Amino acid sequence: MTAAAKRRFNHCGTKLFLRYLHKLRSGEVSETPFHLGGRGQDVRLAARRAGEPDTAVALMTADTLLTAPRRNSIAASCPVSVIIPTLASAERADLLARAMKSVLTGQDHGIVLIVVANGSRFDPETLAGLKARRDIRFIYREEGSAAAARLAGRQAVDTEFFATLDDDDEFLPRAFERQMRYMRADPTIDVVITNGYRRHGEVEVVDFPDFANYGQDPLWHLMETCWLQPAGGLYRTETVTPDIFATPFSMEWTYLAMVLALHRRLWFVDVPTYRMHRETPGSLSSALHWQRQAPETLRRMLAFDAPPSIRRRLKQKHADALHTLAEWASRDGDQKAAWQYHLRSLLSPYGLRYLPFTRRLVQRAHTPL
């Protein structure tokens, strides 16, 4: 270490100690061991310049053990919490175990793992196993909602940063080290967003080939691709508050990404930090009831104070979502629902292109069963 570096180190250490000394005298901190090192004289001199009485530093020699705050929580030595919402079902038990292992054994830093089981479809043995573990924080919610479970996990976070992970995905080794370096270097960054891999069976590809472009205009790119994956963000706890994670049930990541792009500072880093597994059992995003809620989520997003170009794209997507539901209902034989979704799509100026679908519905209505 150079002489200049030593001076900076001693100066920082002295300032930290004096800040702690004031807290100690006011009773804000408890007493646990803290080693001053070889800076006893520097501390004494700085204390006198700061107006502290000599008695406050009378015992501060080079080898004196003083006091410093220590948190009893496990979060004291763990800078990151990871939230995993799960149904804790038997068919996904092995996937959940893989996800948890990637958090607890694959990172350079200690991690606080928060597992939130939700709903009534749980496997009793899997649920009991989660409750019995001492290396995680376990929460159970009766409501079967991944978004609500994720919010409950966010409310339990007490670390400097946090992340989320679906129970069928996994983090790559040293994922958080790659993200935290940017958060540490620039305290104004609220979210670091990274790329990853997407696996379909034995085939693995880069999740976002165009990821390097997203940071130039996140909102515009969001209208084409949701660049925020459940495992793709590291969030600063102080600024990404629980209310931000109060998302709808459907299109929750697009909704969250838009809120963050409008109100928080994002930093895009094109490095892989996660692996997503597709075609896993019980995936919610492919279910019809998830798709049925998409128009309502888009309607809520239209209430945001977004640029006109973004609002136009949201209106287009809203009409598209209604038309998709009309097609699905017609295909499944539910002509009443098909007409309802179709007429709603036509109310938008961007839905007029679906007017020819009216003929198809009329034809099906006159087709003998």
Image (cartoon, rainbow, N blue to C red):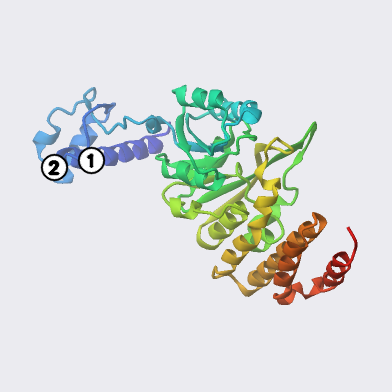
- If you read the primary sequence from the N terminus, does the residue marked by circle 2 or circle 1 appear first? 1
Out of 335 and 126, give the one closest to the viewer.
335
Q: Where is residue 144 in the image (x, y as percent from the top left)?
A: 54, 43
In the visual, does 213 lie left or right of 88? right
Q: Is residue 175 visible?
A: yes
Q: Which element carries disc 1, helix, strand or loop?
A: helix
Element at badge 2? loop
Which amino acid lies under the numbered mark 2 shown in the image of this protein?
A: Glu
Residue 157 percent across, percent down from the top left = 42, 41
| 268, 287: nearer the viewer | 287
Residue type indicated by callout 1: Leu
Residue pictured at 31% horizontal, 29% vertical: 72
Q: Nearer the viewer, residue 361 or 297?
A: 361
- Mark 2 touches mark 1? (CB < 8 Å): yes
Q: Where is mark 1, residue-wise?
A: 18
For residue 80, above or below residue 366: above
Q: Residue at left 13%, top 42%?
A: 52
Q: For this view, does 291 lie left or right of residue 203? A: left
Residue drawn at (46%, 22%), measured in percent from left and top?
Answer: 132
Q: How many marks?
A: 2
Q: Nearer the viewer, residue 216 or 255?
A: 255
The spot of residue 288 in percent (x, y) is 70, 50
Q: Quadrant of the N terminus?
A: top left
Q: Quadrant of residue 90?
A: top right
Kindly identify which numbered label has been placed on residue 52.
Answer: 2
Within 10 Å of disc 1 (Cα), the crowding (few <14, some 14-19, many 20+) is some
Residue 297, which numbered label? none
Give above or below for 312 relative to 45: below
